[in-house]
């Protein structure tokens, strides 16, 4: 899966048309949905599998 943020409406329409011609499924998302996808991708990228200590987390949030 890829997520593309077009720079303008014209480019968005062009990319949608191209994807459809190539036989790909196109799903339009709101900006809020796109931000959620980006946040999830970042979280997966830095996931270590280790549990965080509550005190350490609270200390970092205070900074």
Image (cartoon, rainbow, N blue to C red):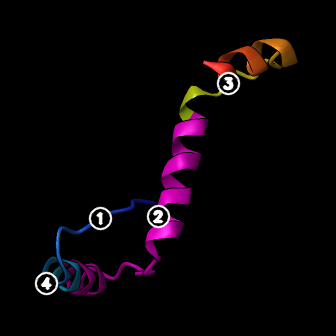
For disc 1, the neighbor class at 10 Å (few under 14, some 14 to 19, many from 20) is few
Q: Position of residue 18 (x, y in %)?
A: 20, 81
Seen from the viewer's position, the closer of residues 39 and 15 is 39
Q: Is residue 16 above or below residue 39?
A: below
For disc 4, the neighbor class at 10 Å (few under 14, some 14 to 19, many from 20) is few
Q: Nearer the viewer, mark 3 or mark 2?
A: 3
Queried whether the magenta region covers residue 24, the answer comes back as: yes
For disc 2, the neighbor class at 10 Å (few under 14, some 14 to 19, many from 20) is some
Write down the residue under mark 1: 5
Q: Position of residue 29 (x, y in %)?
A: 46, 76
* In the displayed structure image, the side of residue 3 where residue 22 appears, left or right: left
Marks 3 and 2, how far apart in space? 25 Å
For label 3, the SS is: helix
For label 1, the SS is: loop
Q: Position of residue 58 (x, y in %)?
A: 77, 20
Say which label, 2 or 4, has the lower sequence index: 4
Say which label, 2 or 1, has the lower sequence index: 1
- Answer with the quarter of the image where residue 47 lies: top right
- The secondary structure that most of the magenta stretch takes on is helix
Give the residue at x 48% y 51%.
38
Q: State the mark number for residue 33.
A: none
Q: Nearer the viewer, mark 3 or mark 1?
A: 3
The answer to whether marks 2 and 1 mark residues whose Cβ atoms lie closer than 8 Å is yes
* In the displayed structure image, the side of residue 28 where residue 58 appears, left or right: right
Seen from the viewer's position, the closer of residues 36 and 23 is 36
Queried whether the magenta region covers residue 45, the answer comes back as: no
Say which label, 3 or 1, has the lower sequence index: 1
Write down the residue under mark 2: 34
- Answer with the quarter of the image where residue 20 lies: bottom left
Write down the residue under mark 4: 10
Marks 3 and 1, how far apart in space? 30 Å
């Amino acid at each position: 899966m890829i997520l593309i943020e077009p720079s303008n409406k014209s480019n968005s329409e062009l990319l949608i048309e191209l994807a459809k011609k190539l036989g790909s499924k196109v799903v339009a998302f709101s900006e809020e949905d796109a931000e959620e996808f980006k946040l999830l991708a970042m979280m997966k990228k830095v996931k270590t599998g280790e549990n965080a200590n509550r005190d350490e987390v609270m200390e970092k949030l205070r900074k």
